[in-house]
Image (tube, grey):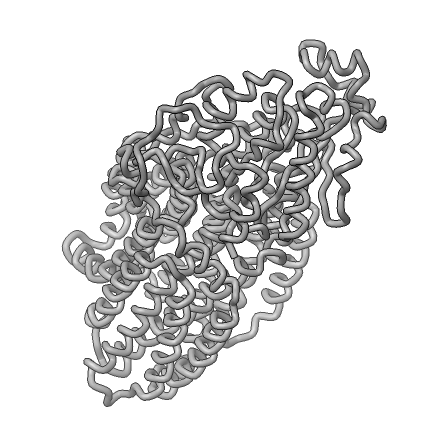
Amino acid sequence: MPSAGDTRVPERISEAGAPRGNPFGARFVAPLYLGASLNPVNSSIIATALVAIAAALHIPVGDTAILISSLYLTSALAQPAAGRLAEEFGPRRIFVAGITLVLAAGIVGSLAHSLTALIVARVLIGAGTSAGYPAAMLLIRRRAEQAGHAAPPREVLGGLSITGAATVAVGPAIGGLLIGWAGWRAAFWINIPVAAIALFLALAGIARDPDPVRFGSPRALASRIDLLGMLGFGGSLTALMVFLDALPRLDWPALAAALVLAAALVGWELRAAQPFLDVRLLVANGALTRTYLRNGLTLMGTYVILYGLTQWLEVARGLSAYQAGLMLMPMGVLTALAARVVSRRAAVRWPLIACAVLLLVGAVATLFVGSGTPIAAVICVTAVFGLTSGAGTVANQTVLYQEAPAAALGTASGLLRTFGYIGSIASAAITGTAFHRGVSDSGLHSIAWVLVAISALVLVMTVLDRQLARADRHHTNQPPAGARNPGPAPSTEPTRTEPPRTESRSADMTTGTHTTPALDPARTALLLMDFQPVVLGAVPDPQGVLARAGEALAWARSHGAHVVFVRVALAEKDAAAVPAHNKTFSQAVAAGYLTDGIAATAVHESLKAGEDDLTVRKTRISAFASDTDLRAELRARGVDTLVLAGLSTSGVVLTTLRQAADEDYRLFLLADATADPDPEVHRVLMEKVFPHQAEIISTADLAALSTAAQ
């Protein structure tokens, strides 16, 4: 990590394999796409091997269904868990660990001689492949922000969806060829070369995570990753899936267990310092919660047709499993094409509305499908659902990227996949209920009526979601990630302390200039740090900087931004815990000028705290070293952008900005509401260091930047 006086661009901005002109070069995205494809490839290929596995192990074919459900259940639990671990330990480490686990699982499955061993291999595959998507999303988000791109990298995000869709599309056909050529073990050993290639590409193309691993004590580690929250989430989800899998029989004990565990999980997460499932965020951030529900319902509708129509084609139309799989290939191809088209658009609202309309059209069309319907017409119906799946997956993924807090994108991405798995399992339950007396036209029509209800709900949710329109207005004005910005070549003149309103102090990777991204006040927190009499007396022009802080506070009040007052003060127990070798705070303890409860350590009287404001007392230099869990509080409010102002530049501003940057917040620094006892230190930090991690603006810029986000 660069030192405070290091004037170079941090190495993370120039990761291995990323050409300076394109932060999303092939060496960076190739391992992400390949790693993210491991889960869908294992989901689709195994279907063609079940009959052969049953014959080889001398067991009923029905018993092999656990090889499918075990992967789905493991993936549903492991996706958000892998995302949380990626946030805690670094996305590259978790990505590489996941691929390594898949490699090991391929070996275990290839050598297995019992159903139990195969189940173990599938569980390992589910756990390993679950790291690919959330870690990839976190890596993409960090790369985009490090490169100074405010808009989502739409084509890169679309590539993740396209890779998965293409894999699902060709998976059954490739699986059938592999199984016919090399036997059922090919469904497992295929992971060995694919994972080995992905591992090599990841090690070569993705730079190491910059921060060292912090394990700490087992108790501290369990608290940081919220192990109890993970276990509670897993237990409630498992019970729910048992209930859904038993339908149409009502397994009341499983449902009761799911509800009790869910209630206990909510109670625990409301008290957890760093919750795994941030209940407060889901309540406060309606756009994110609606994205989960919309994605889950859309995939439920798509998979209802995928499962139901496949069974109907085999039984009612007499096709083989391989022939039915070939008939569904156009659906997969159109899924990939639709994903490609939507990924090139900045707007998401209209693609999501189109997705819901197509889902409804497909549901109504299915009502007219019967045993006498021409095969070409059936293929056309499946094509509608392919368009739905491609458009919906990419658009919902983009909304997630925009709405999820940057520091929690790994967990949020995993939860998006979890909702998809729940929708998939629910669709299997719907299909099983409709066909429980036999596969027939009437059963298919029952599925279609359920699908009509699902699609109508998705359409209403999407049309009434005004946040989608607001997000489109903001992001359509942003240049796409990787786009070159017109303008003059980088200047060699020193950067001014107070920049013009539209000029960014972060250097663009291609031209050296770009427009400062707009502020969304609802997702922004203003941190007013150390505006205390004891600190104000040490900086030049204290009244001037205090007046600018007051202007920033007035902006936050009028625009609905969150406000956090940060002050430094030591209670008696805090003073006793300061070691003698801590030069700054040991001197403060000896002098007694940072004692809590005195007027000198209170927030200056001109900055009045409001009822909804947060005030934190810190016991070290960084704002995050406080008696309040600032990270959790910001996450609960849905904050992913920080506007910083404080005293002094080389103290709380430097430490807080660096830490917040490492935790992937979007950062704006108010140059005229920040000061340092040493003006030269202030100048060097503002001109040489901070621009690489934050947008340097003035208080006068705030109104214009927040208006641009409306």
Residue drawn at point x = 43 percent, y = 52 percent: 75
Residue drawn at point x = 39 percent, y = 26 percent: 9
Residue drawn at point x = 68 percent, y = 45 percent: 554
The residue lying toward the viewer, choosing from 306 and 592, is 592
The residue lying toward the viewer, choosing from 271 and 107, is 271
Residue 250 in view, yes or no: yes
The residue lying toward the viewer, choosing from 372 and 211, is 211
Residue at the extreme left? 181
Residue 45 rendering spot, x and y as whole percentages: 27, 57
Position of residue 575 in the picture relative to residue 93 (left or right): right
The residue lying toward the viewer, choosing from 65 and 263, is 263
Position of residue 509 in the picture relative to residue 449 (left or right): left
In the rendered view, tell whether residue 190 sits above or below residue 306.
Answer: above
In the rendered view, tell whether residue 597 sits above or below residue 612.
Answer: above
In the rendered view, tell whether residue 677 sits above or below residue 19.
Answer: above
Residue 89 rendering spot, x and y as whole percentages: 49, 34
Residue 106 rendering spot, x and y as whole percentages: 30, 44
Residue 246 rendering spot, x and y as whole percentages: 50, 70
Residue at the extreme right? 598
Residue 73 in view, yes or no: no
Quadrant for residue 200, please give it. Answer: top left
